[in-house]
Image (spheres, coloured by chain):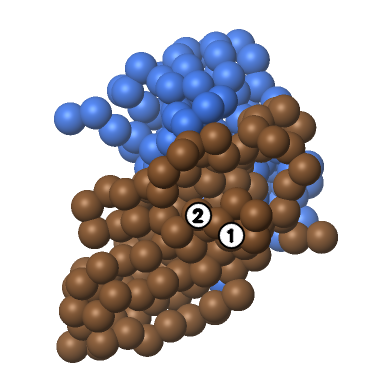
Chain colours: A blue, B brown
C-alpha cells in the first residue's frame, strides 16, 4: 500500500541531545514537508522540499535541520539549539507544491524532552 | 493578522444531524485554494475536500460539502448526517497562488464531538 511512514511514534530525548525523526514515502511524490503541532494549535511549517537535494525553510526552521538525498526520504533532525522541542511532528508529501495537490500525512512522531 | 480563522474551538452535535464548521480567510491573492483536513485522536491528518478560488461550484465529497462564499471570504465545511466516527479535530488551510511559496496556512482547528 502507498503511504507515508514515520518512526518512531514516540520519542524521548534528554536536553542537549540531537534527535532524528524519520519520514519515508512510497507515493512517488516530489514535495515533502515537516510540520510541528503544539496542543490546541494548528500546524506550523518547519521545512519543505520541492525536489531531491533541495529544501526551503518554513516559518519555524530555527533549531531544526533536514536533508533530501532520496526522493522517498526526508529526515528531520531536532538539534539542541531548539529551545522547546516537545511537540507532535507531522511529515507530509504531495505531488507538487502548487495547485490543488493535497498533502498526504504520516501518523506523526510525538517528541518529549525530559 | 490571522489569515485563517476558525472561530469555533469546540462543538457538540447530535448524531445524524448536519454540522457546519466555520472558516474565514484573508488574502489579496486572486488565486488561492482552500483545504479541509480531519485529525482523529490518532493524530494523522486526513484530507477531506478542496475548493479553488476560481471554481464555479461548491466542492462536494460524499457527506462533505464546502459552502464557499467568496465575497465574504468564508469556506465553511458542512458534514451531513453526522456519525460517531466524525468526532475529531477539523482544520481549514489555505494555499495562496503567488505570494507565499505555495505554503499551506493553517487555522487553529475546531474540535467536533458527536453525541450518540
Q: Quadrant location of the C terminus of chain B?
A: bottom left
* Disc 2, SS: strand
Image: B111 above or below A84: below
Which residue shows up at 57% across the image and 39% down it?
A: B53
Percent x, y of residue A90: 49, 47
Between A10 and B103, which is closer to the camera in this rendering? B103
Does residue B45 appear in the picture of this structure? no
Residue B69 located left or right of residue B72: left
Q: Which disc, if any, is residue A53?
A: none
Q: Which residue appears at 65% of the width and 55% of the height?
A: B71
Sequence-wise, the earlier of marks 1 and 2 is 2
Q: Which residue is mark 2?
A: B68
| Image marks 1 and 2: residues in contact by CB distance under 8 Å | yes
Label 1 to label 2, Cα distance in Å? 6 Å
Q: Which residue matches tag 1?
A: B74
- In the image, is residue A92 above or below residue A31? below
Q: Position of residue B26 (x, y in %)?
A: 72, 54
Chain of the residue on which disc 1 is drawn: B
| Number of marks | 2
Q: Quadrant of residue A64?
A: top right
- Tell me if mark 2 has few (under 14), some (14-19) or many (20+) residues whose alpha carbon lies within 10 angstroms of its own: many
Q: In the rendered image, which quarter contains the N terminus of chain B?
A: bottom right
Amino acid at each position: 500500500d502507498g503511504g507515508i511512514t514515520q518512526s518512531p511514534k514516540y520519542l524521548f530525548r534528554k536536553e542537549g541531545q540531537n534527535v532524528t525523526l524519520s519520514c519515508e514515502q512510497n507515493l512517488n511524490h516530489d514535495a515533502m514537508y515537516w510540520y510541528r503541532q503544539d496542543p490546541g494549535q494548528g500546524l506550523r511549517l518547519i521545512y519543505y522540499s520541492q525536489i531531491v537535494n533541495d529544501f526551503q525553510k518554513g516559518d519555524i526552521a530555527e533549531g531544526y535541520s533536514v536533508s533530501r538525498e532520496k526522493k522517498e526520504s526526508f529526515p528531520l533532525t531536532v538539534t539542541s539549539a531548539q529551545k522547546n522541542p516537545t511537540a507532535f511532528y507531522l511529515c507530509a508529501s504531495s505531488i507538487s507544491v502548487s495547485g490543488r495537490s493535497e498533502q498526504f500525512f504520516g501518523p506523526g512522531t510525538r517528541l518529549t524532552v525530559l | 493578522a490571522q489569515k485563517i480563522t476558525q472561530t469555533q474551538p469546540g462543538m457538540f452535535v447530535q448524531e445524524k444531524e448536519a454540522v457546519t464548521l466555520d472558516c474565514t480567510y484573508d488574502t489579496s491573492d486572486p488565486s488561492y485554494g482552500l483545504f479541509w483536513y480531519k485529525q482523529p485522536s490518532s493524530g494523522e491528518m486526513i484530507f477531506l475536500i478542496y475548493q479553488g478560488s476560481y471554481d464555479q461550484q461548491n466542492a462536494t465529497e460524499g457527506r462533505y460539502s464546502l459552502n464557499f462564499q467568496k465575497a465574504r471570504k468564508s469556506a465553511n465545511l458542512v458534514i451531513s448526517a453526522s456519525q460517531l466516527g466524525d468526532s475529531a479535530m477539523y482544520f481549514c488551510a489555505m494555499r495562496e497562488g503567488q505570494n507565499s511559496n505555495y505554503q499551506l496556512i493553517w487555522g487553529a482547528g475546531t474540535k467536533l464531538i458527536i453525541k450518540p
